[in-house]
Amino acid sequence: MNHYPEENGGISKRLPRGFQPLPGYSGLYLSTAFRSLGMDLISLFIPLYILNLTGNVFSIFLFYSLYHFICVVTNYPTAVLTKRFGIDLVGFLGAMTRAVFIFFLIKAESQISFLWLAAIFWGTSVSLIWLPFHYSFTIAEQEDKKYGKEVSQYQIVSRITGLIGPVTGGLVISSLGFGPLFLFAIILTISSGIPLFFDTIKRKGMRLSLAKITQHMTRRGKTKFWLSFVGGQLEGAVLGLVWPLFIYLVVKNYGTVGLIKSGASIVSVILVWFLGRWIDKKGKAILRLGTMFNSFNVLLRPFLFSPFALFLVDSAYGITSDLVITPFDSAFYEAAVKMRKLEFIVEREFVIHSSATLICLFLGFLFTLKVDWFWIFALAVVGILMQNLILNAEEPGYLNLLKRLLRR
């Protein structure tokens, strides 16, 4: 991997008189807390909402395919905006755009065509939010240039909102309907854009070249690295779309669906705090252990038909998935910090959303053919195993990794 001289973070951001800056990652974490809570209230139920509106399972996957396609289309233009106007303003614009997405979800209840407008605004908001976020994350680290601890802290913020969001969302839907829930999510989403202006992170010397991006993406030896991200999208699509449908068909109740997801999040919050520091110390090869546990967990799911069993398997996944997510994200940020950061993040977003566009269409096609649940969940296992490729791309090989791990 080539090392490019790159921009560094800075701390001399101008703030209004009387405001104290939020140090380090604090602004990102606070923004993440509002954004994650807003989305955790509704994200689990969006597939079920679409099913309720359309009565058609394929429409769920078509909606998500359109959303990911818009992410691809808006990816590079958002990078241009970020370079021109900075990470704070673009991130705030992303929060506003996501609020519009949720507003159109509300309108879709009376006019179904708004559902597709919602997908377009959601895809646009993802680019506007996540490009600045990933860039900020890579330049804020000023210590050891390892990201296990930082990723784990970010995951803790997301997990805490994951404790509150699904169960609250399920109860609100059961008692008041989708409308009030979506309105509350809009307020939280708008709030997520504000802390970005009050942290100490500023962009400096961003460089962006479409020719460089194309050259780097097509370079020999990068296939395994990018396939690992495709695997993450395959796992995410199955567990993010298919799994909520499966739970709902078993329990037939929005509140119970939310309770299962929130309860499962509780068991992993403490673990992820220690996990990031362990990964920085032991190395990212622990990802392989996580993939073994997760594969067994996912293959077990289609045979479970009681709410308690669904809770147990989701709880176990909440623990073992940390063995995959934290080292995987840490590997990405460590790779990004060695490259021209903004360009590298654009490459990542292109790979994950272009692959997710095709994966969602493929899953919809499988449901149309009435393929057995087991084989659909087996696709998630393929995705889980593919994520190990990020280690093959970044490290010297499995046996050497194992020896190094044992020596420590």
Image (tube, helix red, strand yellow):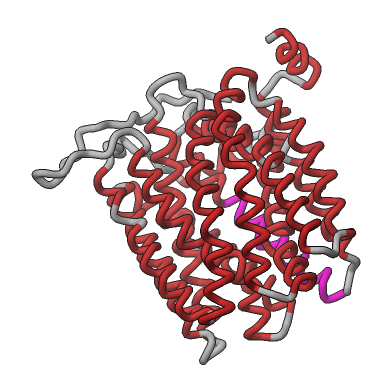
Instruction: Identify which residue is drawn at 62% across, 50% down.
Output: 265
Give the image location of residue 193, x and y in percent: 33, 56
Q: Is residue 253 visible?
A: yes
On the rendered structure, is 296 left or right of 345?
A: right
Give the image location of residue 385, x and y in percent: 79, 40
On the rendered structure, is 38 left or right of 62?
A: left
Give the image location of residue 407, x and y in percent: 72, 8
* Quarter holding residue 61: bottom right
Q: Is residue 84 visible?
A: no
In this view, which residue lies farthest toward the bottom?
110
Instruction: Identify which residue is drawn at 52% across, 91% down.
Output: 111
Residue 35 colored magenta? no
Work out whether residue 7 or residue 32 is closer to the camera in this orientation and state it.
Answer: 32
* Quarter holding residue 386: top right
Q: How many marks?
A: 0
Work out whether residue 220 or residue 389 is closer to the camera in this orientation and state it.
Answer: 389
- Would you place residue 337 above or below residue 249 in this image? above
Q: Main secondary structure of the magenta part?
A: helix
On the rendered structure, is 331 left or right of 372?
A: left
Give the image location of residue 295, x and y in percent: 82, 44
Instruction: Identify which residue is drawn at 72% across, 53% down.
Output: 234
On the rendered structure, is 10 left or right of 399?
A: left
- Would you place residue 282 above or below residue 234 in this image? above
Work out whether residue 4 or residue 10 is closer to the camera in this orientation and state it.
Answer: 10
- Would you place residue 11 above or below residue 185 in this image? above
Instruction: Identify which residue is drawn at 40% across, 56% down.
Output: 34
Name the quarter where the C terminus is drawn. Answer: top right
Image: magenta residue range: 350-369
Name the quarter where the N terminus is drawn. Answer: top right
